Amino acid sequence: MSVLWFGGDHNPEQWPEEVRAEDTGLMRRAGVNLVTVGVFSWSLLEPREGEFDFGWLDRELDRLADAGVGVALATPTASPPPWFGAAHPDAMPVTAEGVRLTHGSRDTYDVTAPAYQAACERIVRALAERYSAHPALRLWHVHNEYGTWSHSAHADRAFRGWLRKRHGDLEALNEAWTTAFWGQHYSDWEHVRTPRATQYLANPAHVLDFRRFLSDAMLDHYLAQRTILKSADPAVPVTTNLAFGDWVPVDAWKWAEHMDLVAVDDYPSAPGAEAAAQTAFAADLARSYAARVPAKGRPWLLTEQAAGVLYTPGRTVSKAPGELVRHSLSHVARGSRGAMFFQWRASRGGAEQWYSGMVPHAGPDSRIFREVCELGALLPRVAGAADARVPVDAAVTWDPESWWAMGAASLPDADLDYLGAVRQVHRVLWRSGRTVDFVRPDRPLPPVPLLVVPSLYLVSDTAAAHLADYVERGGTLVATPLSGIADPHGTVRTGGHPGALRDLLGVRVEELRPAPDTELSDTDLGTVRGWTEAVRLTGAEPVAVHRSGDLAGQPVLTRNRRGSGTAWYLSARLDDAALGALLAGLGARATAADLRAGPATPSAPEAGVEVVRREDGALTWIFVLNHTGAPYPVAPASLGLAPGAVDLLTDTAAEGLTVPGGGVAVLHGRLSP
Ligand code: GAL
């Protein structure tokens, strides 16, 4: 039977011997089978340049092996030691304002600095030679959450090299960046630098290429480590934990192709129902990254989440009782090979001393550790689902480059929020009980029944062709405002929006009408706030119109038949209820009335119960996560289960089962024929 990994970041170097000894006992009690060791331990492993001290790590890995706990051994390169910065100040990162950072926190590195690259390769080679055959080793965990930007002279040099490869000659770069605007035309490559602090709005194409470059430069750094680790033993899987945030310049679609196990960290930014929605979003995204890897797809794993309080400056989110189990099982339901945490034991001191752990400051006699033990006991019961597929009802496009491009300060509305638009679509589909894959539009698209394209700002000709092909083959596509507007350089496609998708959607938008925070009109679909557009029909039929405002009588939603499918265009911003009703009601003959938010009849997930399926042939595992405080009676037949199904978590019959408020069930059995 497949294993589901369970554990967290383990930092024995922060603790005396008696605590380390207690830890292995507690891990066994909790059912922990994998811990991530050594993430920030470079200064202890190499206390002086070229001098190694592996004694403490040898002892710890041996102890873990004896206890039957596997290790994801980290390369410690996310935190170079104090001696490194002193010896190589040029390898410390430089901010956009030109400030060279110094040692004192973590993540203070410049992936483009030769001295940093050489030091990383030395420590990684030493670790690979010493531990690749260690019995505790299950996985190499490279670095930690890549993401430090640098504007150093090294970065300038590397950026220019990258730009030469992308654009060829300088004139092509001038053209791609529209440098004729504001007199930015370059006459010498040496004048091209990373986008530093400047007087007013930066050139958006320059910034966009810098973000692409950073992703590639960091990927090169990861690949250099991967090569060393693989040459020691190609059989040991290698990964790095991907973070999610607008400071992260990593194009995870590309990176996933170089990861044996796609690893993601997930920290919802809000509590309660929103945390559950964000958890599902993170998990669906991770599964999608892994699925896009050539051949059969790769496994993926939740490598970090909070056990209790997540505290970072400006943000504090606590996990309520029961959420530790529910969020973990939401990830497993959506395909994760387990549930890992940051971190095993909460630190006493240091910058994250108030950050929660599986063993909190209070020790094992605590609610959190009891929930950890509960989860550790539940996971083996659902491990049979580890290889089962996650059937989906819809797909949503996700494009990091559009996200980066829409972060530019030069767009027509300061409220434009690509991530927010994608999250909203995912959230309303999640609430209506639909499981969603994310797709990257520059690859051929899968034949899902519904494809939503939220605010896909940058669309290449290739992506436009894939979207058209999806529709022609019978798909239902819904595009929302700002899609198709610009080419991959961020240059507006002239002649009417939505540029690359005009023909597919059968409309021509003459004018964008942004009005931040303003109610713009009542429409057949509901109230429109913040954004609308003047749409002319060039083949599409109007399905819903504005009832008031400047655009009264003009279309807000259109439908265009193309091949055997249909392409819809929504030209305005709707709230969750209206967007949810629209996506639920789409159909070849749908009228405005079918798509208008009527009195809500909450389906199970809308009432706060999340239902996710796994399937393997005729066998199914149905995860029921009750995020509400009220009991939820299960109806196995209406979920498609044949008689005889059981709840794997309680070993009771699914028939007649009630999932308590805040509780979970995993119904397992055969699908009804
Ligand atoms: C993650 C990071 C961990 C820890 C955690 C809590 O992003 O990988 O090392 O810092 O956040 O803030």
Image: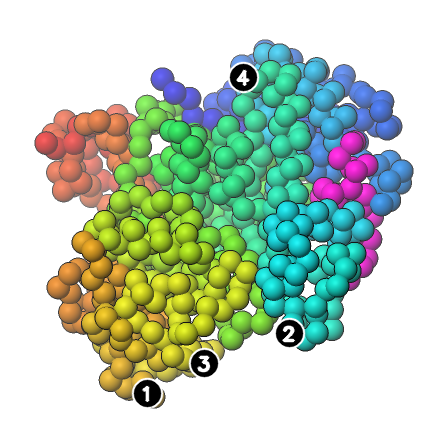
Between marks 2 and 3, how big is the CA–CA gap?
A: 26 Å
Which badge, 4 or 1, is on the more N-terminal residue? 4
Residue that badge 3 annotates:
515
Which badge, 4 or 2, is on the more N-terminal residue? 2
Residue stretch in magenta: 91-119
Of the 4 image quadrants, the one containing the C terminus is top left
Circle 2 SS class: helix
Vertical side of 100 occupied by 178: above or below: below
Residue that badge 2 annotates:
181
Asked whether 428 or 326 is in front, the reply is 428
Circle 1 SS class: loop
Which badge, 4 or 3, is on the more N-terminal residue? 4
Asked whether 39 or 653 is in front, the reply is 39
Ligand 1 sits in quadrant? top right
Circle 4 SS class: loop
Which badge, 3 or 1, is on the more N-terminal residue? 3
Q: Is residue 93 magenta?
A: yes
Residue that badge 4 annotates:
235
Residue that badge 1 annotates:
549
